[in-house]
Structure formats: structure tokens, C-alpha cells
Amino acid sequence: MSSWKTEWIESKPRIAMDCMGQGPLVVFMHGIGGNRTNWHDQLPAFAARFKAVAWDARGYGQSDDYEGVLDYDDFCADLRRLIDHFGVAKAHLVGLSMGGSIAQDFYAKHPERVASMVLADTRTGHEAAFDQKAREEFIRLRVKPLQEGKAPKDMAPAVARSLMGPNAGDRVYQRLVDSMAVLHKDSYIKAIEARTTWKPSFVPAKVTVPTLVVVGADDKLTPPAMSKTIADAIPGARLAVIEDCGHLSNIEKPAEFNRIVLDFLTSQ
């Protein structure tokens, strides 16, 4: 099977994306410390049946940085540009962590453009578990070192360890470190600030498209109980818990993640 091809949406900010396969459009969206390469274990697996596309969100990877503060509406506008770029009415959205939040916001604004959703290791923004103490720890690990003059590669090892499951090996650790080491420092800080003040417009009870919620059993940032709450609130949603797996379920357990999500998408 041929490899993915990198394409760009040229309007500003320019958005980079890796594309592979033909068929219904599936868009993979990375987390706050990631980029499109986080989905390279997924693209070949999905390309046999779908047009599989993984983006760099604005300010990440090879996508452009931007002026001013970040609003999640900006991500939604970029996602709409991406779907329009491929000339289709709807896309299946697969979002992990921050990517799952983007999927939720996009559904709230443009439900007619969404064929289905996979919300992986994410949160709705309404839950009590992400309280002030949790927010402060989230910021301490990620932003404080950068404000003190360090580069993303300096904070990457500690953050990677905090996200991994207890039995994740060196391969997972290195992929997470490599991903965070190439973060755009200023845009990453903007994303963290937007994340901690995010006010979602998503209403789970109003969802009418097939939805799958996926979570690693050892995810400490968005634990299984949080994912169960999300799945319980969305009519007809399924919940899949991947054992022996932390926050980056698609990287730690790619074969299981791919099987679960492909089974979901092909059963519709």
C-alpha cells in the first residue's frame, strides 16, 4: 500500500494534512501536545475503506501560526475549510483529547457536516473532575517551564510520563517526546490558555449521529469514569475501554484502537 501524501489548505492560516485512501472522509485530530504524525498508525489501516486525513491544527506541525489569541471557533472554521477542500457534505470525525473537544464544538455548530464522531480520551468541559486543582497541575507541567525560558523539548519528558500508561514502553515514550519537542512554543501556550478557559457549546443529549467514546483504562488525564459520563449522556453512544493503556490510546494500542474504530465506522 502506498504511503500518505501531505497536502495543504492554502487559505490563511495554511493547514497541513496527511492524506491516504479513497472513500468517505475520516478526519483525525490530534491532542494539545501532538501533530498529524500521531495518526500515522491509523492512516494505512483506514485507507482501504476511507479517505483518511490527519491534520496539523493551526499553530502545530507544518500548519501556520496565527496572530492574536486562540478561540476554539478558529479550529471549527479550519475544520470546515478542510471538509470543503475535499468537496464533501459530511465527514466522520475522530478526535483525541483536544481533538475530541474540537469535534464536539464543530458538531454543536455544524451538525449537518458530521457523519459520526469518535471521541477518544477527551472531556466535555462540563465535568467537575477537571477542577481548579487539576487545571493548575495541567498548566504547571506544560506552561511553567516555557514561561521560565525552557523549550518544548525540555518539558516533553515529564509530560510524556504523565500521559503514558504504566506498562507503555520506550517506543511510546519516544513518540510522545518527539511529538512535543517540535511544538511551536507561542502557539502551544495559546492552546493551553484556550484549553483551560474553554466554554463548550456542545450538548450531548442533542447528538443524533452515531458516536463512539474511546478511553484507555489507565488514562489519568481523562479517566474512564469521565468517558462513561460522556457516553451515557449521548443518545445511543457506545463506550470502548482499552485495557493497559494511558491517555494516547491510538499510539499506545494502535491495533486495538484501529479495530474498535473501524468496527464502529463500518457498522453504520
Image (spheres, rainbow, N blue to C red):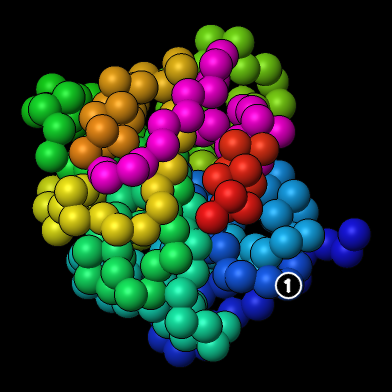
Mark 1 closeness class: few <14, some 14–19, many ≥20 residues within 10 Å = few
| Amino acid residing under circle 1 | Gln
Q: Position of residue 67 (x, y in %)?
A: 28, 75
Using the rendered image of the protein, determine whether residue 231 is visible from the camera's viewpoint.
yes
From the image, tell me which residue sits under label 1: 22
Residue at position x 13%, y 48% in the image: 197
Lateral position of residue 229 relative to residue 85, left or right: left
Using the rendered image of the protein, determine whether residue 143 is visible from the camera's viewpoint.
no
Lateral position of residue 265 relative to residue 209, left or right: right
Numbered disc 1: secondary structure: loop
Q: Would you say residue 246 sits in the magenta stretch? A: yes
Residue at position x 36%, y 22% in the image: 224
Q: Nearer the viewer, residue 191 or 102?
A: 102
User: What residue span does the magenta drawing correspond to?
Assistant: 234-258
Point out the residue furthest to the top here: 166
Q: Position of residue 105 (x, y in %)?
A: 25, 60
Lateral position of residue 40 relative to residue 210, left or right: right
Point out the residue furthest to the right here: 1
Q: Nearer the viewer, residue 189 or 201?
A: 201
Label tally: 1
Q: In which quadrant of the rendered image does the N terminus lie?
A: bottom right
Q: Position of residue 161 (x, y in %)?
A: 49, 20
Give above or below for 253 relative to 51: above
